[in-house]
Image (cartoon, grey):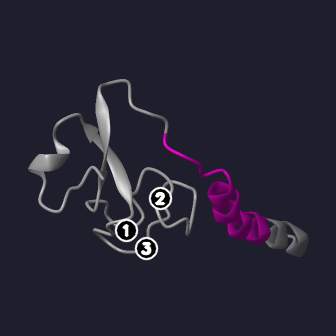
Amino acid sequence: MNNLLIASAVAAALALPAVAAAQAGPTPAPSYAAEKCFGIAKAGANDCASMTGTHSCAGMSKVDADPNEWVYVPAGYCSRIVGGQTK
C-alpha cells in the first residue's frame, strides 16, 4: 500500500474519537414523564451536565454513583432506587 494512504487512514482513525466527543451534548428529554435522578449514574453514562459545573455534556461522568451526576428515570422511580436523589 501507498505510505500516504496508510498515514491518512491512521490519522482518520485517531481523529474519529475527538470528533465524536466534540459532538457530545445534553441528552434530549425523554418523551415520557421523567425526572432527573442524581447519584445513580454509572461512570460515563450520565445524561447531562454535572451539578458542580465540571462538564456540560452527557457521558462525561468519571465515577459511578457521583451525587452530582444524573440520569433521566420515569417519574416517581428515583425514590425507589438506592442512592437516588431528586435534589
Q: Amino acid at mark 1?
A: Ala
Q: Which residue is mark 3?
A: 62
Q: Amino acid at mark 3?
A: Lys
Asked which secondary structure carries label 2, the reply is loop
Residue 1 visible within the image: no
Horizontal relation, residue 38 to residue 17: left or right: left
- Packing grade of label 3 (10 A; few <14, some 14-19, many >=20) is some
Quadrant in the picture for residue 33: top left
Residue 21 visible within the image: yes
Residue occupying image coordinates x 74% and y 71%: 10
User: Is the residue 28 above or below the residue 18 in the image?
Assistant: above
Q: Which residue is mark 1?
A: 43
- Mark 3 and 2 residues: CB-CB less than 8 Å, in contact? no
- Packing grade of label 1 (10 A; few <14, some 14-19, many >=20) is some
Q: Which residue is mark 2?
A: 59
Residue occupying image coordinates x 44% and y 67%: 61
Quadrant in the picture for residue 41: bottom left
Q: Amino acid at mark 2?
A: Gly
Mark drawn on residue 53: none
Q: Earlier in the sequence, mark 2 or mark 1?
A: 1
Which range of residues does the magenta coloring cover? 9-27
Horizontal relation, residue 56 to residue 84: left or right: right
- Mark 2 and 1 residues: CB-CB less than 8 Å, in contact? no
User: Is the residue 78 above or below the residue 76 in the image?
Assistant: below
Residue occupying image coordinates x 40% and y 56%: 46
- Packing grade of label 2 (10 A; few <14, some 14-19, many >=20) is many
Tally of marks: 3
